[in-house]
Image: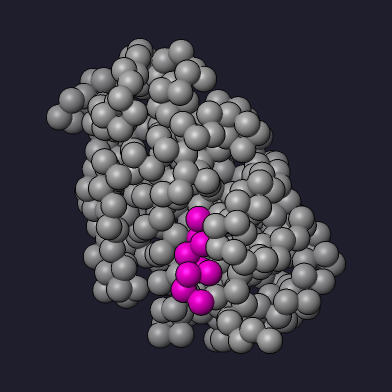
Amino acid sequence: MSTAPVVLVTGGAGYIGSHTLIALHEAGYAPVVVDNLDNASLRAIERVRALTQAQIPFHQVDLRDGPALSQVVAQHQPQACIHFAGLKAVGESVAQPLRYYHNNLLGTMELLRVLEEAECFHMVFSSSATVYGDAQEMPLTEDVPLSATNPYGRTKLFIEHMLFDVAAAQKRWRCMNLRYFNPVGAHPSGQIGEDPSGIPNNLMPFITQVAVGRRPHLQIFGDDYSTPDGTGVRDYIHVVDLAKAHVAALAALPKITGCEAVNVGTGRGSSVLEVLRAMEAASGRAIPYQVAPRRAGDVAVSYADPSKAQRLLGWQAEHDLTAMCQDAWRWQEQNPQGYAG
């Protein structure tokens, strides 16, 4: 009988979730996955099982289905939860705000209720740097006033408030809101990676899909920002580093009281053109692009102050932009159509 601590991972079939399953397994935890497969693939779970040589339990359950969720929790009796599950496309959230509020907020409320009933009071939440809104001062620290510029960002912000509130009301709760910046890259095996449905919302999968021939060219939104090359600057973090941050947060939960917010980033910004050039080097292919007007709500520069993560979690990013691009390209080249290939 295994004595490894059981961790419920919601959204564990998704991009960051699947990489975190491997990190959890390597750290001696026993992950259990709940995912409704709304924007994820069961093949990710199958490949994680092959990579870890572990039979990671999977349950296709929507978090809003309280009875089904209760059944999973009663069966596995987790000691902690890492909560990734949620809809995550900014543009889609603007077009379908009620769908986003219903899915992300109601799902989290039901999850917290079920966990409380099962006396599981440890949670690491997948938050986002979107909770900083249009903050201008860089680097971003956890003390920056919070706001959000779209419904997706607001769901992250509301859930953070929810966790602060439940931790204030029930002193047994220990919660960590990990505010991460721009996850990119893939597992070094090339077996799991980012596989967005439809047109990618994020830069890296768009660039790799152009490089592999799935799309004709990259659109760069704005080249007239006050940045070194005129394109937007963001803090890109390797998904393997990000996965390890969740494991570090889990281990740090007993040392905190209540709820803490922690930035997860490298502390260094890279421009769109820098990322494009690094991907050209990694893939050995020219990547055509066109410049389009700026998008509403985009800020020129955004990068983290990751010092709290170093202090509280004993964690820091290890991979540079070159490694991020090499791993992202290996995944895309081996899986030109993603998991559907």
Residue 220 in the figure: left or right of residue 82: left
> Where residue 213 sits in the image (x, y, percent)?
47, 18
**Which color mode does the image show?**
one colour
Instruction: Identify the residue shown where x is 41% and y is 64%.
Output: 244
Residue 171 in the figure: left or right of residue 298: right
Instruction: Identify the residue shown where x is 24% and y is 53%.
Output: 267
The residue lying furthest to the left in this view is 228
- State the quadrant of the N terminus: bottom right
Q: Is residue 106 above or below residue 280?
A: below
Q: Write down the region rendered in magenta.
A: 19-28
Q: Is residue 269 visible?
A: yes
> Where residue 6 sits in the image (x, y, percent)?
62, 77
Q: Is residue 156 above or below residue 339?
A: below
Q: Is residue 199 above or below residue 1?
A: above
Most common SS among magenta residues: helix
In this rendered view, identify the residue nearer to me: 273 or 292. 273
Instruction: Identify the residue shown where x is 48% and y is 70%.
Output: 26
**Was residue 335 drawn as part of the magenta stretch in this picture?**
no
In this rendered view, identify the residue nearer to me: 192 or 158. 192
In this rendered view, identify the residue nearer to me: 21 or 303. 21
- State the quadrant of the C terminus: top right
> Where residue 149 sits in the image (x, y, percent)?
46, 40
Instruction: Identify the residue shown where x is 46% and y is 13%.
Output: 216
In this rendered view, identify the residue nearer to me: 93 or 81. 81
Query: Which quadrant holds residue 111?
Result: bottom right
Q: Is residue 106 visible?
A: no
Callout count:
0
